[in-house]
Structure formats: structure tokens, C-alpha cells
Image: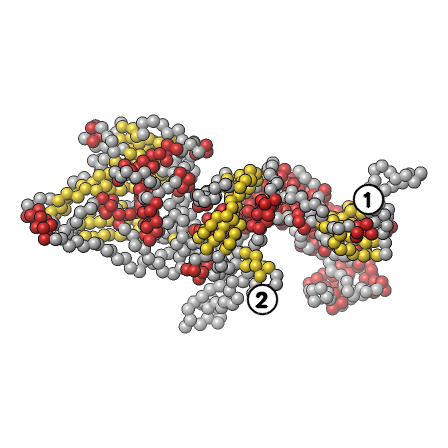
Amino acid sequence: MFHNLSGYDAHFIVKELASNFKGNNDVLPINKEKYISFTKHVYGFDDNKTPWYNHMQLRFIDSFKFLSSSLDKLSSYLNNDKLRIVRSEFAKLSADDFDLLTRKGVFPYEYVDCAEKLEDTRLPPRESFYSSLTGDTVSESDYAHTENIWQRFVIRTLGEYSDLYLKTDVLLLTDVFENFRDSCINSYGLDPAYYYTLLGFTWDAMLKHTCINFELLTDIDMVIYIERGIRGGLSQCSNRYAQANNKYMQSYDPSKPSSYLMYFDVNNLYGWAMCQSLPYAEFRWVDDTSNFDVNAIAPDSSKGYILEVDLEYPQQLHDAHVDLPFCPTHDKSPGKRQDKLLATVYDKKRYVIHYCNLQQCTRNGLRVTKIHRVLEFAQSPWLRDYIELNTRFRTAAKNDFDKNLYKLMNNAVFGKTMENVRNHVDVKLLTKWNGPYGAEAMIAKPNFHSRSVFSENLVAIEMRKLEVKFNKPIYMGMCILDISKNRLDGKIPRLGNNCAAFMFDEIRYELDGVEIDLNRNVDITSTLKNYTTLSPDKALILTNAGWDIAYHHVVEGDFNFCVPLNMLLGFCEDYKRVVINARHELILIRSRNDNNCVQVDAVVQPRIDIFKIHWRIPHVLLDEVTKLSMLRTLESGRYLSMGFRSWDLYEYPLFQSTTKHSWAIKTASQLEKPQYVIFALQTGRKNVPNEDITIFNDCKLTNMKLYLNSECYPYDDMNLDFDRDRYAILYEMFSRFRKAYYGCDCDETFLTTINFLIRGPFVVIDCSRQNESVKSATVDMRLEFDCKENVPDNTTAYCLIIHDCVVEYSPLTNVVRRIT
């Protein structure tokens, strides 16, 4: 075992093994001059000069391929009680002397240019430890440590120091690797001594723990398709120079605006990506791409997709995205010959991308102009258990050595997923020229690449592979790289869906100081109402009001919306007549924070400043005939009736740890007669800036019933099972609602079945058909619902009640009174 064997010149070892010992030489090459490992086959002979049946294999491995740190750093991770081999060799040393040997020493390599210098009786001066590789000499502390060893161990010559230096190096490396073996065997039941690199070891440990069975790609088009999607991680300097100016600096200039420089780093980036849903089997091309809706796919869907698309990068996004554009590509920088990974705001053609990244792009304003191909696969978070296992091991580790090991075990898994088998080469170490397996025959082969001559009797021949076996799940590496870019999602602020409604806690409409309609929870109320009553065409129009479930509205400075009040108040939607001789008032109560308005990962709460609110009320000019008719009505002194449907939202924020729930809803007045009820559950989204509060959750709901006194809606059980996609009855109730609510003939709905499941689901109950016992009496309202499992913590239930209201007013006397 050698530390950094492949990084140093191991040719002298290879040359001696090949020249002085009979037997084959096997290498695991990086190229013809650098090897991960090499093996010498040594045969023993009996008295008749016959090779023994069981021959010996001397395998040389590189410990740096397992533990990629300096020996000094690795040994510092170990406590003295872990240095068992060093202690056994220096058992008679005092504790102080032993401590001197547990630190990696230094040696004047360039000074010792002949054997005579090893006879020096004094330690060479510090300048003699100069290294042309580093361009510097050793530190003062390292030199003082060397002087201390020279004196304490009564060293007489530089040769004796060399022996001690080499001996402690070998023993420290042995202890380091033996502790590494012990930790691996205890944690994974595998011995790394049987492997060549940490990549191979952790890959087997992962396979052993997860029991995953990969499907290897057999379609070469799929292989090339995936390879086109592998682009690596982005590393760039977006802004070449920035100068801070703030009160914490000595050079602070108070006459200039304050500015700060901040450093952000995503911890465990690839570890997080490997915990997400990853592909493993069932790869197939999607036949119909014309109707493919990428935004309808949930991140944790059982099916995942890799798409080849054309993307338009709208001009208005360029300034907002200039620091970190989406969809980097391999291209040549201006004036350069070599391809680099460039992040640009150019349009993209035939760009291969993971569906989660494409969703990220469309949320931030990029537009898909064409879908060329779609590759479907089965996915699940199958790797999460192994990543979390190593995280638990690292948390429980009692020393830095083990902590560093378990971190490496996770990082190495990702490295193995990126293995490119096209780069594999064959290297032959040959000691003869003639013969079918000699150097002459190898050089004559068509796949000969190059050679390196080590000596008169040893040459290394590099051969290209005649056959490439695509036996690695490279689709994993591609998806991990793409998914990791989603970790930056939210760094570019964007307005959340229905943002304008979430700016206010309450909105109230009054006539002559009398409340006509009130919405105490404008945000969730209008969201649920819009999901159930909008048509696709109306939803497109309302993007001007901030209604946009695709999140195309990227925030960059100022913005404005035009919000129709029929989105927020039932009166404004239902009442179609004029109101005369009355004072109109609209009272808006601002939300306590803007966490639900902006989608952003932020270290501070987002804030929106409202500069101006302008209320536009249409005015009607009457012709003479209509004006006379209206005056006669006014002279009669009759009250004018205004009927509409009011929206009241109720919350049930605290759930008991059970699967059955009963919720008695205390309405403002028991005289209110619910006509429609919309029920939804939501977990962990309220007041969380990087979560979309307009998405609801199924919480494994199995049944729900509404009771108005003794009347039950719906009559039959729903028998829902979201794990088995049994929710058709819910979508049927949802799709019927709009037609019944508006009395229209159109069956069109805003949400497709897939979007209904992603954005919801909701339970929409039509209870407008009521018997006389309910119509003529006060109403007690109760919801009972069952779930397959206990409702998760931080879950809120919402119940939106739509009921009839009637208000009367007298234009002459300005008297307004509420009837129901």
C-alpha cells in the first residue's frame, strides 16, 4: 500500500517487478503512465522446476484513492489510543516522546541529492527543506518539531533521521488504513482491503444496503440522450469586482449608499439531491409529446421524465437572471477554442433536461416552445436510506476520522454514478518484443493508441477498448446533477400564485357605513373559490391579477396588478345592478407579513411595500326613459333588495393524533343556510416563504361527510385511496360544481385531473337541495372525515361555506339593513 501511488512515479517499482520476477503484470490504469493499482503474479517452483498450482498475487493499491487527504491530516483525526501499530513498535517511549511521532514529519528531499549527505551529523538548516513544487520551505513550527525529534531521539546522522521518518510514515499509514477498515467492517459489513477505490467500496455498500436492482440501458439512443444531459456543475464568477461600503468597515463612506458582500454556500448539495426521487427502471420513450404537461408532474411522482426541449429566454428576464441564468450549456467562450460550461440567457435548442429543472425554469419565466422527445422512467427516493444512514453514522461518530469517513462515503456514491466507461483504456506491461502477446503484436493491432518505454526490457502499451459496455447507471449521475440545481430554486424571487389576495388578511365592503360583505381570509378563500369556479380562459385573463399557478411572474423591483373584486367578494361577483345615492367604502386590512406572497428561500422575511391602491368603480349613464323609470321607483319609497352569495372560511388548526375527526363548525349565525361547502387540508405551508400556500394536500383522506342537523351530504361513502389513485369521485364532484354554481351549460373546468391532484385535492359538496326541516330551522353544521393514517403535524383543515345573503337599502333615506 502506498499513499498517492497513482500520483507519484511508480515506474521504478513496476520496472523491478517486471524485470526481476517471472509472471504476468496486471494494471488498473488511468493512462499508460499512471495506475490506480497494479498486480504482480509470482509463481513458486518445486524441485522439478514446476510452477505451483496456487501462485501468489502481489497487489499494490493506493490508499489515497480511499482517503483523499494528506497523511498528516488523516493521522491528526486519530486519537492516540487508535494508533495501535505505532504504539506496538514504540512501546517503551514516554507519552511525550510518543506524541512527537504521531505527527507527520518533514524531510529535505531536494537537499539529499547524494548518499553522502545522509552522513551529515547535524540537521540541515530550514532553508535546505525548500521544495520547488511548493516554492517555499517548511514552516517554522514544522522545523522546530523536526529539531525536537532530532534531540529527543538522540539522532546522530541524517540517515538515522531518514529511517525514523520513513518508519513512522509507514506505521502511521498502516494505523490510518486499519482504522478505516475497522470502521467500514463495523458499519457496512464489507472490507475495503478487497477494493481498489472508495468509489467501488461505497457503491457496493450502497447496493448491499438498498437492495436496488438497476435496469441498464439497452437502447443506444437512450444512452446518447442521457450523455447529452450530463453537463457537470456550474463554476463561474458572475461579477468580477464588487466593493462593500457599510458601517462595519474602516473605509466606510457615510455619504454613499450602504452595501454588503455576502457569501452563501449550499451544505451537502449532492447529498440532498441523492435523497430525492431518482430513476432506476422502466425506461421508455413517450409516444405523444404534443399534450405533455410537465408542470402537472409532482416532484415525488412514481414516474419521472427527461425531456428534450426548445426554450425561449424572454428578454424581460435577462436583467433579473444575469447573475445566475438557467440551463447552462457546453460552448466556446468568445476567442477560446475549448468548450466550457457557460450560463447564458440565449434561447436553448434541443436542450436535454430533467423535468424538475424544467419546472424550475418555467416557474421563473422561461417558455417551452417545443418538446422534441420525452424519456419516461420509474423513480423513487431509493437512495435516501443509504445517505441518511451515513448521516446518522456521522452524527454518532466520536472522532474526526469517522466523521470525515462517512462524509466521503456519501460523496463517493455520486462520483461512481458519473463514471464514463467510454474513457476506459487497456494498458499492457510487456517485457518481450516477439510472440503473439509481445510488444510488436500489440503495436500492430488497430486499437493501438500509444506506448511508454520504461527500460530496455519493459514497455507500457496503451490500447483503446474494442468494445464499450454501457453497464453503469449513468442516468443517475445526470439526474443528480440536474436535481442539485433545484436547490437554488427560490434564490430568484417570484410572486406566489394569487399574490394580491395574500397581501391582506381581511377585505370588507360597506354601503353608508353598513357592512354588506366581508371576507376575513381573503387569501385561502379566493384561492379555493378560483380553483373551483374559474374556466381556463378566465384563468389566463386573471394572470393580470396575479393568478398564475405556473409562477411566471419574477419579481424585479416594482410591479402592479389589476384585481377584479369579483375574485375577492361574493357581492361583487353576484350583484349585477347599479347602486345609487350611497357611499361606497372598501376596507382592506394588511397581512402581518408577506411570507405567503413571495416564493423565495430567504434568510430574512420577504416584504412587499404597497405604494398605491386605486379603486375603480364603473359609473353608468342612463337614457331618459330608464331615468324616469328609476325616479318612479325611488318615489315609491320601497326598499331595494340586493341578493348575493357570501363566502365564509373556517379553519381547524389543531388535530388530535387519530384517523377519525369530527369538526362542529360555529358559524356567525345559525340562520345561515350553506348552499355549497369546499373542504381542503394543508400541511406545513402557511407562512413558509419557500412553500406554495396555494397547494393543498390529500393527507390520505378516505371519507368525508357534511351534516346539516341530521341531513348528511353526500349520502354514500367516498372510499378514497390516494395511494391507489382512487379519487375519481372527488373530481366528479369538483367538475359538476361550476356548472351548478353559475347555472351554465359549459362543463369546462380549470383543473385537469392531474392538476386537481397536484393543486388539491378538494372536497366540493353541493348541499343546496335541502328538505324543509333544514330550510325552516336553525342549522347545526358538522364535518366528519377519516384518514388512512394520522394527520401530519402542522396540518390545517379549511372549510369554505358559500351561503345566500340578502341586503335591503333605501336610496332616499340612505338606510341599509341586512336581512340574512
> Could you tell me which residue is drawn at 6 percent across and 48 percent down?
632
| Mark 1 or 2, nearer chain start | 1
Give the residue pinned by disc 1: 41
Q: Is residue 329 visible?
A: yes
Residue 169 seen from this side: no
- Horizontally, residue 136 falls left or right of residue 312, namely right
Looking at the figure, which quarter contains the C terminus? top left
Coordinates of residue 57 in the picture (x, y in percent): 80, 43
Task: Name the amino acid type tagged 1.
Answer: His
- Tell me where residue 684 appears, x and y as whole percent: 41, 43
Is residue 787 placed above or below 230 in the rendered structure?
Answer: above
Residue 684 is left or right of residue 38, and the answer is: left
Count of picture labels: 2
Q: Write the residue at 33% across / 47% down.
A: 537
Identify the secondary structure beneath mark 2.
loop
Q: Residue at x 45, y 44 (%)?
A: 290
Q: Which residue is disc 2 drawn over?
A: 335
Q: Residue at x 32, y 33 (%)?
A: 783
Distance, label 1 to label 2, CA atoms, is 52 Å
Kindly indicate whether the residue at mark 2 contacts the one at mark 1 (C-beta within 8 angstroms).
no
Residue 84 higher or lower than 337, as above or below? above
Pinpoint residue 215: horizontal percent, then vertical percent. Answer: 60, 38
- Label 1 secondary element: strand
Other residues around mark 2 within 10 Å, as few (<14) / some (14–19) / many (≥20): few
Task: Please tell me in which quadrant of the rendered image residue 704 appears.
Answer: top left
